[in-house]
Image (cartoon, rainbow, N blue to C red):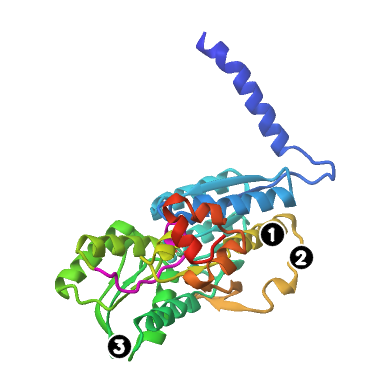
């Protein structure tokens, strides 16, 4: 009985698979492209990167199949997901590594199977076999954060800050940190500085709690590496009764962070046009899958050294967002609509900030 009910479903599934794997009118065989993203706590991956990538790929080749996995911040899980993509016949792997050093093993396996790898957003380290690296200027992200923090702290001499960096296994976290230090060193006192395991907001909250106790709540500013860690740090400062909250940075232009900026709980975020990043990745993946020559305008000769090789690279430009330019950045770019941001709770603050 059970089997009988299953049969039509299986037949149908088989037909769908055949449709995806069959030949198109032009005679090209449909390809599978793997997109492997690192975590699901930060909103961008499942809600922005993946849909933008999927839609662009669909536009480029409607019968291509996207093999999507999210490693939920676990490097061995990502290794398994990559192996599954190789076994499933992926033509290209677009990989945003949980652990930039550990992911070199994935590139080695892909290379052995003749599958090109694009390092997406985060650099895969110490492998000579990487085809492309596609990201933002991540040191510039840290510098934007540091400069915005200095501006917000005003003229106070030698202000005491807490610096909450990202996950040490993420090469971007290292670059954000370098960029921030490049503008803050000599101008601030680092009361406490942390690297935040897994980029987890809960860990950032605990770090901030510890800093507030150690510094007797004397904090003039907080350099938080992204919006998730900023959210954790803000929760800790609110729980400790800090009023007003000191200036605090972020990154990703997450909706919650934009709303915190509108009401003044967060000073700034860094907007990275994820649509441009994901669409360039889809285009590159398509070109590599179908053997289309990648135009030189894609990288303009730019390379980034990953410890083993100069990897052809595309680095997009990040933008600082404060209350004053939410409208002309994230809203103008269609990343969020005014309706997304200005729900009833934020309506009056939105009007005051000129967001419509
Ligand atoms: C990304 C950020 C993100 C962070 C945590 C970084 O590599 O560039 O956009 O907030 O990882 O996932």
Residues at marks 1 and 2, CA–CA distance in whole angstroms: 11 Å
Q: How far apart are marks 1 and 3 (CA)?
A: 48 Å
**Up/down of 95 relative to 214, above or below:** above
188 with respect to 108 (left or right): left
- Determine which residue is flagged by label 1: 283
Q: Which is more foreground, mark 1 or mark 2?
A: 1
Q: Main secondary structure of the magenta part?
A: loop
Q: Which of the 4 quarters of the picture holds residue 134?
A: bottom right
Q: Give the range drawn in magenta.
A: 243-257
- Identify which residue, 180 or 329, lies in the foreground: 329
In the displayed structure, does residue 118 sit left or right of residue 75?
A: right
Q: Which residue is drawn at 56% across and 66% down?
A: 327
Neighbour tally class for label 2: few under 14, some 14-19, many 20 plus, Cα within 10 Å: few
Q: Which residue lies furthest to the right in this view?
A: 26
Tell me the quarter of the picture where residue 89 sits: top right
Reading the image, the residue beneath label 2 is: 293
Q: Which residue is drawn at 45% across and 80% down?
A: 143
Q: Which of 320 and 102 is in front in this view?
A: 320
> In front of the other: label 1 or label 3?
3
Alpha-carbon neighbours of circle 3 within 10 Å: few (<14), some, or many (≥20)? few
Q: Is mark 3 on a helix, strand or loop?
A: loop
Which comes before the other along the chain, label 1 or label 2? 1
Total labels drawn: 3
Mark-to-mark CA distance, 3 and 2: 54 Å
Query: Image check: 116 left or right of 158?
Result: right
Which mark, residue 156?
A: 3
Mark sitting earlier along the chain (1/3): 3
Q: Which residue lies furthest to the top in this view?
A: 1
Q: Specify whether residue 257 is in view.
A: yes
29 with respect to 142 (left or right): right
**Residue 343, above or below 22:** below
């Amino acid at each position: 009985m059970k089997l009988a009910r299953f049969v039509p479903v299986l037949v149908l599934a088989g037909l769908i698979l055949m449709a995806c794997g069959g030949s198109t009118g032009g005679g090209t065989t449909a390809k599978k492209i793997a997109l492997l993203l690192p975590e699901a706590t930060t909103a961008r991956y499942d809600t922005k990167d993946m849909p933008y990538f999927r839609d662009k790929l669909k536009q480029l080749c409607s019968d291509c199949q996207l093999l999507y996995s999210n490693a939920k911040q676990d490097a061995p899980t990502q290794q398994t997901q990559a192996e599954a993509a190789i076994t499933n016949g992926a033509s290209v792997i677009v990989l945003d590594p949980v652990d930039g050093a550990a992911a070199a093993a994935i590139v080695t396996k892909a290379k052995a199977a003749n599958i090109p790898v694009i390092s997406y957003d985060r650099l895969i380290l110490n492998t000579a076999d990487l085809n492309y690296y596609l990201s933002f200027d991540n040191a510039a992200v840290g510098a934007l954060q540091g400069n915005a923090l200095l501006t917000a702290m005003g003229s106070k001499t030698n202000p005491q800050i807490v610096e909450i960096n990202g996950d040490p296994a993420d090469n971007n976290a290292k670059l954000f940190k370098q960029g921030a230090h490049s503008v803050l060193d000599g101008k601030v006192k680092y009361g406490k500085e942390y690297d935040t395991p897994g980029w987890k907001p809960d860990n950032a909250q605990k770090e901030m709690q510890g800093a507030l106790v150690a510094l007797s709540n004397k904090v003039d500013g907080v350099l938080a590496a992204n919006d998730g860690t900023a959210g954790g740090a803000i929760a800790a400062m609110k729980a400790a009764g800090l009023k007003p909250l000191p200036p605090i940075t972020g990154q990703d232009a997450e909706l919650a962070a934009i709303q915190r900026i509108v009401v003044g709980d967060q000073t700034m975020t860094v907007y990275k046009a994820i649509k441009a990043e994901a669409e360039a990745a889809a285009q590159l993946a398509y070109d590599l899958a179908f053997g289309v020559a990648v135009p030189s305008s894609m990288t303009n000769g730019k390379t980034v050294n990953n410890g083993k090789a100069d990897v052809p690279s595309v680095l997009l430009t990040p933008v600082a967002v404060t209350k004053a330019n939410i409208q002309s950045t994230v809203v103008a770019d269609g990343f969020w609509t005014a309706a997304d941001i200005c729900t009833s709770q934020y309506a009056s603050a939105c009007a005051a900030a000129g967001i419509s």
